[in-house]
Image (cartoon, rainbow, N blue to C red):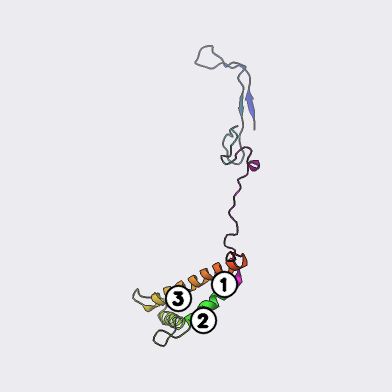
Amino acid sequence: MAASMATSTTIAGLGASSLPSQQRVNLTSVMHTGFIKTRVAARNPLKVSGASGGRVSCSFQRDWLRKDLSVIGFGLIGWLAPSSIPLINGDSLTGLFFNSIGQELAHFPTPPAISSQFWLWLVTWHLGLFITLTFGQIGFKGRTESYFDK
């Protein structure tokens, strides 16, 4: 909504002073915010004149993870096989971890105690899994993208 005041009016209390007729006041409002909209154009601080049309270019790959489900599958198998070998007093790490889960679920509403063996098996099993997945990702992607052929 725009309104303009272009007439000369006398202001009460100031004697015979009046507003000059050359001054023009334009009021504009924005319907959705209710504030008076300014006429200042916003500038983009990242826009450099003459550099690729004002767009910022980046050499970083958007798909930096480059995930592959075969790496997850082979990594899980690659960790379950060695962690299932009975090396810890005739038990395997996977067996000890899953048995400790069953023992802790026996008293379910109560959480595991700090001194429970469950935490040791949980951290050890998952640390081994994540290390295997990380090296599997590096090896698989390194081979498919020929990092090691130099």
Q: Where residue 35 sits: x, y (%)?
A: 56, 36
Numbered tag placed on residue 72 in the rendering: 1
Residue placed under numbered mark 2 in the picture: 81
- Three-letter code, disc 1: Ile
Q: Amino acid at mark 3?
A: Trp
Residue 110 in view of the camera: no
| Rendering coords of residue 122 (x, y %) | 43, 75
User: From mark 3 to mark 1, how far is it between C-alphas?
Assistant: 16 Å
Alpha-carbon distance for marks 2 and 3? 12 Å
In the rendered image, the residue lying farthest to the left is 115
Q: Position of residue 7 (x, y in %)?
A: 63, 18
Residue at image position (50%, 72%) is 132
Which label was assigned to residue 11?
none
Which mark is first along the chain, 3 or 2? 2
- For residue 14, above or below residue 89: above
Q: Is residue 97 left or right of residue 59?
A: left
Quadrant assignment, res 109: bottom left
Q: Residue 15 versus residue 101: which sits nearer the camera?
A: 101
Along the viewing direction, whichever of 48 and 38 lies nearer the viewer? 48
What amino acid is labelled 2 in the image? Ala
Q: Which residue is mark 3?
A: 125
Classified by dominant secondary structure, the portion drawn in magenta counts as loop
**Residue 55 left/right relative to 107:** right
Let me know if residue 83 appears in the view.
yes
Using residue 113 as the reference point, say whether residue 128 is left or right of it. right
Q: Could you say which is closer to the camera, residue 62 or residue 121?
A: 62
Q: Which residues are magenta?
A: 47-72
Specify whether residue 53 is painted magenta.
Answer: yes
